[in-house]
Image (cartoon, rainbow, N blue to C red):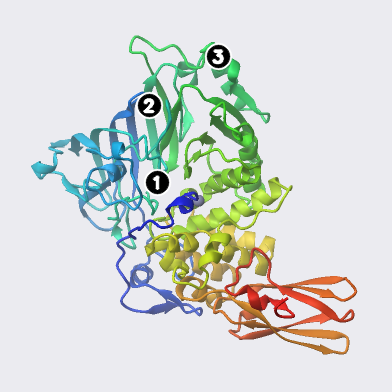
Amino acid sequence: MKRCLILFLSAVAASGATESAAQSSRSSGASDIYVPREVQAAYDNGTRSEDGHPGPEYWQNGADYRIHVRFDPLTGDLAGRETIAYRNNSPEDLRNLVLKVHPNMYRKGSARDMDASPEDVGDGVTLDAVTMNGEALDPSPGAGEVSHFLNGNLLVIPGPIPAGETAAVELEWHYTVNRGSHSRTGGVETTTWFNAYTYPRIAVYDDIDGWDLTAYRGTAEFYNDFGDYDVTIEVPEGYVVWATGLLQNPDEVLAPEVSERYQAALASDEIVHLVDSATLASGAVTAMAGPSGMNAWHFRADYVPDFAFAVSDHYLWDASSLVVDPATGRRTLIDAAYHPDSPDFYEVAEVARNSIDYMSRVFPGVPFPYPQETVFNGADEMEYPMMVNDRSVPERMYMVSLTSHEIFHTYFPFYMGINEIKYAWMDEGWATFGDFFITNHLHTEEPLRLFGVEQWETDIGGWNDLPIMAGSGQARHPAYFHASYPKPAFFYLMLRDMWGEERFRDVIREYIERWNGKHPTPWDFFNTLEDVSGEDLGWLIRPWFEEYGAPDLAIGAVDREEDTYRIEIVRVGRNPVPIEITVEFEDGTSEVLNESVSAWKDGVGTHTVSVPARGEIRSIVLGNWNTPDANPADNRYPRGD
Ligand SMILES: [Zn+2]
């Protein structure tokens, strides 16, 4: 997500990414979708293709991280050292390396588009040592050897890193993790923490924009290259660590009984209570530490775009595993760690398991790509590779929606390495669409509405209702929210409605097949949709993604011709949407008719629907609660009903 941000931050000013505006208007293919010059250059250079495949010259850089962290859960003090192997696969020699230091969002003077508790604002990250290819550099801002920009949010280390070569970077740093202003990361309560963005990382250098020079300010999310992570986290005895990656040394860090249960969960379809209240009461959760009093938790994760970890000394822990790929028998360990008083987390491991089963078998029908998924009872609604930081929520339906939403992000933006800073809709629309189906599948007591449509309706057709591309890449809340969550989710919904479940899934799977482990842009997505479906989709993509406008249908003339009613539907707004009408006859019977959005394919302004007449019409209602409409007053017949 983060989905909850909109609930209390919708009025906060945000600053968008520093993307360069395209100066020329070009188009590709028959659909006439707008192509910025950076994307056209990628076609011309052969790194991407107009048919939606990665180009013959496609490349991306990557970095492997070996990290050692020491964390004090009483103070929040974190000290780390890391060795990064950065591969320059680009055809250019890089003069410098750019690093991002996200915790410096809390540094005094940093621009933020969210509030920060005064106690969290301080000196930020102190760099204790920087080494580039074996050469030690003075990391202090005054020395001039490492350049500090935007209050240390960006660091530049001199290269060069010639094309095709690998640079070795070593860093040591320390800082105090934010405790009072939990935003995606930080203190949860007393001795519980969800720690993300804890390590300086190499920014992405790609074929579209070169270096990504945006600083993290709180709203816009992230963009990371893929790499292998080998991370050791030292915490005091009694604290459990959950993290991205499989735990490599359960015997060394868990109490013998908990370690046995952990091994059992790796092969168990049933939920195993690794730590229950009796275990907590006994105090025998972790292994006894040596003289240092610290346990070192070792995790490894292959080919992931980020790493996060969580810590607590008083959480319950449930786990089981699931065969996610019947062809190979590969299992995923699925676990939930939570506060004993949480009203909903006792069920989360089961819901997470059922969600991952749905994802692997039904939609997208791609085996869950990771060996592990932990849902941690934190203080936010946020996704990481193999980790989720979710707060407790009071309603079961919302718990299912939240759990499935965050886990669904595994595919986008992690398995598909999406630039969320520029194209937040690519992963938020996806996760919103996915949690809609999974929740309505797993929680059948009441229907879930497409997340965010209600908020969007308050602004629909107004100043804050921006084209998806502009809104999710450049705008502030609430325009950012509407453009990133409900609008693209609704676009997915329209495609599924138009193509049918199976064909839609096949097209999406082909997109995933082409771009997993890479960095797809919106144009790679659009081109793939058109290439695989064989359809020109400009009539649908242009109004939703590029142009100002809103969905607004109205009931026009209603005429009876003998046994048939002809009901005219008028497209008042520019954005095409599916047609659903419910006709009620005087005899009390009713009829529901659906037409997909393709009714508007030819750019027409009206569309006529025919209904067999069973006597006089009492009423007609146009639309349904998942289909937004800027002016619902004209969706009823007779008017003023
Ligand atoms: Zn999300």
Image: 573 above or below 188: below
| Ligand 1 lies under 8 Å from the Cβ of mark 3 | no
Along the viewing direction, whichever of 152 and 9 lies nearer the viewer: 9
User: Label 1, on which residue?
Assistant: 226
Q: Which mark is residue 281?
A: 3
At label 1, counting other C-alpha atoms closer than 10 Å, the crowd grade (few under 14, some 14-19, many 20 or more) is many
Task: Confirm or deny contact between disc 1 and disc 2 (CB under 8 A).
Answer: no
Question: From the image, which quarter does the C terminus lie in?
Answer: bottom right
Badge 2: residue crowd in 10 Å (few <14, some 14–19, many ≥20)? many
Residue sitting farthest toward the front: 640
Q: Secondary structure at mark 2?
A: strand
Name the amino acid type tagged 1: Phe
Can you give x and y, in whole percent of width and height, for residue 258 in the image? 55, 18
Amino acid marked by disc 3? Ala
Please, what secondary structure does the residue beneath circle 3 have? helix
Q: Nearer the viewer, mark 3 or mark 1?
A: 3
| Residue at the image point whose x is 60% and y is 47% from the top | 401
Q: Is residue 639 left or right of residue 403?
A: right
Of badges 1 and 2, the one in the foreground is: 2
* Mark toward the start of the polypeptide (2 vs 3): 2
- Image coordinates of residue 133 in percent, x first then y, are 19, 39
Q: Residue 433's spot in the image, x, y percent?
A: 59, 57
Q: Quadrant location of residue 146?
A: top left
In the figure, is residue 336 to the left or right of 191? Answer: right
Q: CA distance from mark 3 to mark 1?
A: 41 Å
Q: Which residue is mark 2?
A: 233
Q: CA distance from mark 2 to mark 3?
A: 25 Å
Query: What element does badge 1 sit on?
Result: loop
Numbered tag placed on residue 31 in the rendering: none
For image coordinates 66% across by 70% down, the residue present is: 498
The answer to whether residue 329 shows anywhere in this view is no
Numbered disc in front, either 2 or 3: 3
